[in-house]
Structures are given as C-alpha cells and as structure tokens.
Amino acid sequence: MPGMTQVHDAPTAAGRPVSDAETDLLRRLHEGSLREIEVAWSDPFGHAAGKRIPAKQFLDRARHGFAFCEAALGWNTDGTVIDGLQLTNWDDGYSDVHAIPDFSTFHLLPWRPGVGHVISDILRPDGSPSLLDPRGVLRRVLARLATLGYTAKVGVEFEFYLLERDGTPVQSDIHAYSLENANTLDPLLTDLYETLDAFTRLEGVQTEYGPGQVETNLVYADALDAADDSARLKYAAKEVARKHGKIASFMPKPFSDQSGSSAHLHISLWRDGQPAFAPVDGAENELALFAIAGLLEHLPSITLFGAHSVNAYRRYTPDSFAPDTVNWSRDNRSAAIRSLVESPEGTRIELRTGASDSNPYWLVASALAAVIAGIEARRLPPPGGEGNLYGKGSPLPESLGTALALAAQDDTILDVLGADSVTDFISIARSEWQSYTNHVSDWERQRYLTTS
C-alpha cells in the first residue's frame, strides 16, 4: 500500500511548524485571490456542516473561532435535536460553541472558484474542547495512542450508489472493476475523479458490485488526515452528483437484492517513523496480534460507531462481501478482520464492518480504541480462521437496538473514547432506533392487515 505523501513544515518565528497548506492559505488571503472560506465541521452522523465566511474577515475572526449553536452537534439524521443529552441541552440554553479552523487542512473548493475550505476543531466558551465534536473524539484517541508510543496510519475505502433523482439506479450493470461500466457513468465519474483528486488524497475510483455503485479509495495517511479526507470525500461526492442531476447515496443498503455499501479501514501503527506491524518470519508480529485481539474482543461494542443507522445492519448477511460474525483471517473477504501481511510498510489490519453512512471520525476513533485496548491488555487472539467464515464465530449485532446496548456496556471502550461523548452519541443513535420501531411499515400492513 502506498505511503502517505509527507508534508514538509517550516518553523515560524514562534517556533510552531507551519504546513504547506497554511502557507498557501495565508498567501492567497494576502494576494486577495480568495473571496470566501468555508469553515467546516462534522455533525454527529458525518454530514458536512459549516459557515461561509467572507475571506476579508476570515483571519480576524479565526483566532476566536466562528460561533454556532451547540445543538448542531446533538441532532440526528433528519436534523431533529435530541432533548436530554448530557453535554448540551435546555439547561444550558443550547449555548454557542466555536469552530476553530485548522489551517493545515486548507484546500481550494473545486466546484466554486475563489473559495477555500478548512476543517475545524470545536471549542466551548471556556476554551475546552467540545466533547460532542467527532474530530475531537478522534484527537483524544490519538493522544491516548501516543502515550503508548505509537501513531496510526489509515487507508479508507468508501462505497456509495449513484442514483437518479427518483432513487432508481443510473444503470443496471453490476460489473465491479469494469472500465466499460465506468465509461457509461461519464461525464459524472470523470468529474468525480477530478474533484476528489483536487480535494482529497485520492488513490483511485472504480465501479463496484451494484448497479451504479462506486468505490473510492483514499491514500494511506495519518489517521486524522484520513478522517478529514473521508469527510471531504462524502461532501464532494454528493455535490458532484447534484451538479449532474443525480444523487450520491451513502445509504448502506438501498436495495434488498443488491450489494450494500461499506466503509473499510486499513490500519497500521508506527513508532518513530518505522512500521510497528512489520512481519516476523512472514507472519503477524506480537503487536499486530495484540491489535487483532483487541478488535475481536471489542468489535460487538464498537460496531455502533461505524453503523449508526437502522439500515446499516441489513448488510451483515452471508455471501454479501460484508461480514456477519466476529472473526479474523489472512486476506479473506468473508472475515470481519482481515490481516494483510505484506512488506513492513504495507502490513496492516483491515476492519470490514463499517457502513458507508458512518461518520469517519467516530469510525476511525472506535477502531483505534479497540486496538489500544488490545495493546494494553496484551492478549493474543485465537488462530485465524480459514476458508468460508460466514456463520463462524459470534454474530455481529443483528440490529441497531442490539448495537446500542452493547456499546453502553463496554467500560474499556467508554474509557478510551470518553464516556460522556459515547453516552450522548448513543442517545442520538437511539433516536433513530426509536423512530424506526415506532413506525408501522407498509410490509407490516400488507402481511398482517387481513391475515390477523
């Protein structure tokens, strides 16, 4: 797997390193070539949120941040603010928090000339990080990992469907990796490729195993950069599709009889710039085995953070190329955890349970939390499985309701992710489950109305 493109920093007068992206942002602001900056952040379920700020005001306001109502970090898929959260509620009047732009994330916005885009960290009025900020959750997990002496690199794969505006597939062909199939998706697919190449660290785009389904791969990068790129990928894909009169849907299972869409993570740890998962005698080293053991032990309880919707759990079925049980194996796509033993730099662990609608910050943070738990516990996993592993091992959560209960019971993961952050994420996700269970569906009426 290709390594991350390195950013070469130069020290400022104050001794703080400045990234190439920050230098570019400051130069463009000085030249007057930017008219606007999008100040962006992620809501709980990964929707692109933010403000459009006049470029001439940006620097003066960026130091103190851009205020917005903290309720925007406490709503669900359709934007319903969830009452009774611990971290934001009517008791504090849904007070303001502040988006502090991370200048190192600056990119030009490909679809609006003269506009820049920066990703923000969220601070409360007292200057402390908002515990509802998904990016902040990942930052805290990475800090915990650093106390063990490691950094993480992550490669991310996102799948999604290109659909007509009425929700039907744009084509009927299901050939994955088909260049002919890809050509039929032009000019949209070429626009998508060029936009993502300008806006993210893009590794490639290909057709997937569903009608109009696309897979996008991001270059292996430091974990926070990988999550930032993933957030931008989803934002950009939706905008490109909209411009072409289509929908880019990250719904995990939009069609009962077609492939679901996933978000796969490729994870490795590094120490002092060297790959910490480097194989020993062609096999996983001890640290990699600790990490696999942690993922196995905590996978049922972290599933929620990569599958927060009711629909996501329809993917966990046999022969679907999504896992249905908790297990691991070498280079085996029926396993939930896939160990890829390659070169020292390329050896990694793939987690295959994430859904395409996941918030990338929570997805990466929860996977690394399980890895941290495994390293700290220093237990070895059982031998990896072989052959068809569908149905072998304990089942993954069968529903969002089950995943909610399991997430709340894992004290180790609560500790690493932050109990307050997890508790409110569970409450927000529970609103999805309650809305679903309270709804009487057409299927129920058709099945029971006259037969009961």
Image (cartoon, rainbow, N blue to C red):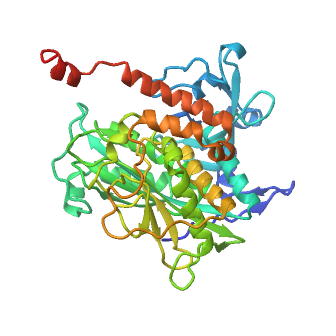
Residue 59 vertical position relative to residue 222 in the rendered view, above or below: above
Q: Residue furthest bottom?
A: 281
Q: Nearer the viewer, residue 426 or 201?
A: 426
- Total residue callouts: 0
- In which quadrant of the rendered image does the C terminus lie? top left
Q: Is residue 6 left or right of residue 351?
A: right
Q: Position of residue 42 (x, y in %)?
A: 56, 37
Residue at image point 59% right, 54% down = 370
Q: Is residue 315 left or right of residue 58?
A: left
Residue at image point 44% right, 32% down = 401
- Can see residue 52? no
Q: Is residue 331 left or right of residue 182?
A: right
Q: Position of residue 403 (x, y in %)?
A: 47, 39
Q: Is residue 370 left or right of residue 13?
A: left
Residue 45 vertical position relative to residue 431 in the rendered view, above or below: below
Q: Residue furthest left?
A: 450
Name the image quarter holding residue 30: top right
Q: Position of residue 339 (x, y in %)?
A: 47, 68
Q: Nearer the viewer, residue 295 or 172?
A: 295
Residue 38 vertical position relative to residue 321 in the rendered view, above or below: above
- Can see residue 3? yes
Name the image quarter holding residue 393: bottom left
Q: Nearer the viewer, residue 9 or 403?
A: 403
